[in-house]
Amino acid sequence: MTPANANPVFRALADPTRRAIFEELTRQGEQTVHALTRFAGVSQPAVSKHLTVLKRAKLVRHRHEGRETHYLAQPDALAPMVNWLDHYGAFWRERFDRLENLLQRMDK
Amino acid sequence: MIEPAATRSLVIEREMPHSPEKIWRALTEAPLIEQWLMKNDLQPVVGHRFNFRSTPVPQWDGIIESEVLVVEPHSRLSYRWASMGLETVVTWTLTPTIDGTHVRMEQTGFRSEEDRAYKGAKYGWTNFIGNLERVAGELD
């Protein structure tokens, strides 16, 4: 993990409203600016400003369709912050515990 | 920053007071595997392709692509473990001891660029938010 590389992403997501917008896009898939404005409960210019910051951090990308702009989460941008080795280290240790529990139950 | 394309491994070892035969069953019988690892359709036959399946989360279908690579009954089992751009091999080695079995799990093939790959909301999100708040706190 190298926080230095991750800073643009951290900065973008340090704001709770931007984080909520990003999480919403992660959960719901592509959304229009209108839908995101309803979700965020702030003005549309404010939402557009937040989306611009997210876009600069490559956390979202957008496309135009008619008069609507659609935004899509780009979770790959989180890459600087996660680590497979750490993840699987914790994962397998927990699974080893479960394996041992199962082996004890198999004695019966 | 360009990092060397070396691969890294994860090793977890534990002594278990059970026979290699019994542990082998837990490692190779699908209904037993499901109880401690994940839903699966593993068959201990070299070349058999199968999946491990966990609960889908946003951005991840929960599927691990797998193929049996090595089957040496009661001693060694190896399978592919691939998901979300990660391409690794998991190898189990069972060695009898006086009181039971030494169990060794090695997951090989972590590439440096994959260390930084998105690992899925299920496991990543909590850590991610925790790290985020810590680092964000350091920024200002």
Image: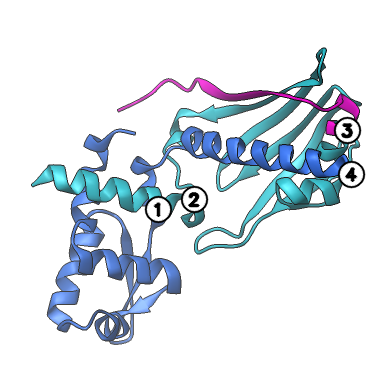
Chain colours: A blue, B cyan
Report if residue A96 is visible in the image: yes
Identify residue type, mark 3.
Lys
In the rendered image, which residue does mark 2 sit on? B123
Residue A4 position in % (x across, y down) = 22, 35
Q: CA distance from mark 3 to mark 1?
A: 35 Å
Chain under disc 3 = B
Chain under disc 1 = B
Residues indicated by labels 2 and 4 sit on the same polypeptide chain: no
Residues indicated by labels 3 and 2 sit on the same polypeptide chain: yes
Residue occupying image coordinates x 44% and y 74%: A28
- Note whether B74 is above or below A4 in the view shown: above
Q: Please tell me which of labels 3 and 1 falls first in the chain.
A: 3
Q: Which mark is residue B126?
A: 1
Q: Is residue B80 magenta?
A: no
Q: Which mark is residue A108?
A: 4
Q: Secondary structure at mark 3?
A: helix
